[in-house]
Amino acid sequence: MFGTSTNGLTDKLLTFRHGVHPEEYKELSNEKPIERMPFVEEYTLPLLQHIGAPSKPIVQKGQRVKRGERIADAGAYVSVALHSPVDGVVTAIDLFDHPNGQMLPGIKIKADSFSTQQLDQPIPKQPEDMDLDEFVEAVQQAGIVGLGGAAFPAHVKFKIPEGKECRYLMLNGCECEPFLTCDHRVMVEYAEALIDGVAILQGFIQAEKVYIAIEANKPDAVMALREASKDKYPVEVVPLQVKYPQGAEKMMISAILGKEVPAGKLPIDLGVLVSNVGTIVALSQYFRQGQALFERVMTVTGPAVRRPSNVLVPIGTSMREVVEFCGGITDEAVRILLGGPMMGVVQKSLDTPVVKGTSGILVLTQKEVQPFDTYSCIRCGRCLEACPLFINPARLGLLARKGLWEEMEENNALDCFECGACSYVCPSGIPLVQSIRVGKGMIRERKKK
């Protein structure tokens, strides 16, 4: 399918139709090896770490816990367990600031300053000795969620629905968001664990073909994974054109397979299972080392960060302490985002904890956060040319502002995954994606009622 050129990539890079080309800014941290964040004094672990129901605490104030010990059970099927990132003592079970802007229940743990913090958890039953239901339950108990940002519980995705089949396993290593480089470093530094995780998952889903999709601006990751999989496991490492939002699962499927996921459907309806590369590494670490998901790699970057870095951070660490570990921020800092600039969430302060879905902390200066005026739509069509799903953002934005929720749904508003490409190219400065997001929320609320 792919011809190899002298740079180890391909003569013709695959991609999807439409999309945009924002500045990458990867050079700030893409060559920075992953550093381990030193242990801090306190950790605050929100019970809501992922899409779905929050976890239910199983510890009490004053109870001693060990690093890797389960401190909360899954609150429903679409939920996962939560584990302590340190040896320590539970000091509070209360409401705390959450990165989503709300005050939500969580568990606060004071670290044991005399502990070596060595992981001392039993190795779980090995995958080859499990059936599918046991495997799915083990992944849920390990607290594994998608680490690409959405934090969808992994076990739900790994259990193929009855009547469906997984023909293609597709691993997402595109990391198309500007600034972020944590997935890049995971692929370079954990290549063998990633291939091992693929083998574990393949033992249950039995996909006909395994692809690892990587944007072509990560040639070292492409080569590392080709070397790690050579003579070990049959995967196809596919370099893709550098374009946003190449890492969206529907766009990857379009680029690699030339197939479109129908409106209202999921990738599995086409026989495709998509998972982030970090999630698959977490799978290997759990079954081979007994390490549940209580820490993750994240990028701390931006023009206002003194020492942009890729850091392995225990879940629950204060973002302020993570940023201070990376040299702190400059006086020019004006905006803090969790995630990248296209889909990231603005933070009011750094006094909130890292959660499982925190892929990065981005700190920008006034130069990158330029105020702009909003004008009337000039019907230029740029948002239509940018939208990877071929919907009409200008029309949806207008319907949202008029409160016409039914008409929004009829125009496929729920298919929008809020990539922000339409807002990025709008010459009138119309906040299209924000309007569509509000409209989608109203549509869902009306459906509930």
Image (tube, helix red, strand yellow):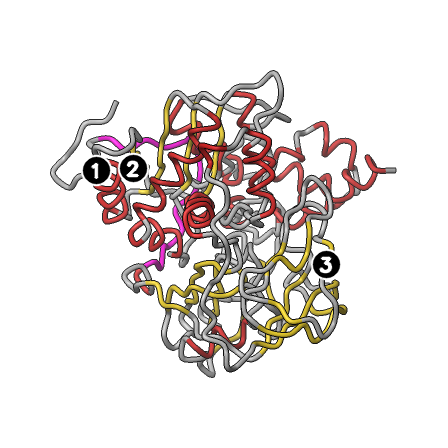
Which of the two labelled residues, at mark 1 and mark 3, occupies the earlier sequence position?
Answer: 1
Circle 1/circle 2 CB separation < 8 Å: yes
Which residue is tagged 3? 58
Q: Which residues are magenta?
A: 12-26
Q: Which residue is mark 2?
A: 239
Indicate the amino acid at tag 3. Ile
> In the rendering, at what x and y percent does residue 162 appear?
62, 20
Q: Are marks 1 and 3 in contact (CB under 8 Å)?
A: no
Q: Secondary structure at mark 3?
A: loop
Amino acid under disc 1:
Leu
Residue 15 within the segment the image draws in magenta: yes
Which label sits in the foreground, 3 or 2?
A: 3
In percent of the image, x 68 and y 56: which residue is there? 72
Q: Which residue is mark 1?
A: 9
Q: Position of residue 171 (x, y in %)?
A: 41, 37
Q: Nearer the viewer, residue 117 or 259?
A: 117
Q: Earlier in the sequence, mark 1 or mark 2?
A: 1
Instruction: Label the magenta part by its dominant secondary structure.
Output: loop
Secondary structure of residue under mark 2: strand
Q: Is residue 219 magenta?
A: no
| Label 2 Cα neighbours within 10 Å, binned few <14 / some 14-19 / many ≥20 | many
Relative to 146, does residue 160 appear above or below in the rendering? Answer: above
Give the quadrant of residue 303.
bottom left
